[in-house]
Image: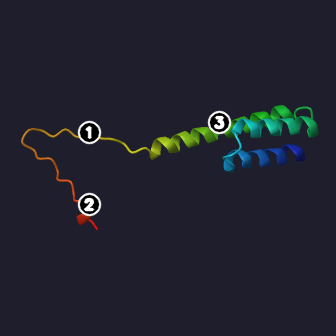
Amino acid sequence: MSRVDRCLLRLATYEITFLDDIPLGVAIDEAIEIAKRFGSENSPTFVNGVLDRIATTLRKKIEIERVAAKPMEVEVEIGEGEEKPAKPDSWRLM
């Protein structure tokens, strides 16, 4: 791997991972354009493939975290003759 490719991958990965104000597509496109100008003949394809994989993995991770953060609603059926559990008073908990 050339130094140019390695530096581009590091920079674009940082932008994708930590800078929320830069869209994923923009970070990838900028890295590809720089690779076309300063890299080897195969650099743009290589940089595009690696950054696309990183972006896809990051999107899946974000989606998993979003689903895990949602509170689950559970319905409990109470049979005949059973009482509903009393809700604690919030002011008594303090």
Give the image location of residue 63, x and y in percent.
Answer: 54, 39
Q: Mark 2 or mark 1, which is nearer the start of the sequence?
A: 1
Amino acid carrying label 2: it is: Ser
Amino acid carrying label 1: it is: Glu
Secondary structure under the numbered disc 3 in the rendered image: helix
Closer to the camera in the image, 90 or 54:
90
Disc 1 to disc 3, how far (Cα)?
35 Å
Location of mark 3 (residue): 56
Disc 2 to disc 3, how far (Cα)?
44 Å
Q: Is label 1 or label 2 in front? A: 2
Q: Is residue 73 left or right of residue 92?
A: right
Secondary structure under the numbered disc 1 in the rendered image: loop
Q: Is residue 47 above or below residue 87?
A: above
Q: Is residue 50 above or below residue 85?
A: above
Q: Is residue 28 left or right of residue 90?
A: right
Give the image location of residue 12, x and y in percent.
Answer: 77, 45
Secondary structure under the numbered disc 2 in the rendered image: helix
Q: Which mark is residue 39?
A: none
Location of mark 1 (residue): 75
Q: Are marks 2 and 3 in contact (CB under 8 Å)?
A: no
Q: How many marks?
A: 3
Residue at x-position 72% and y-position 35%: 25
Residue at x-position 83% and y-position 36%: 32
Q: Mark 3 or mark 2, which is nearer the start of the sequence?
A: 3
Q: Which mark is residue 90?
A: 2
Q: Is residue 62 left or right of residue 24?
A: left
Give the image location of residue 40, x and y in percent.
Answer: 92, 36
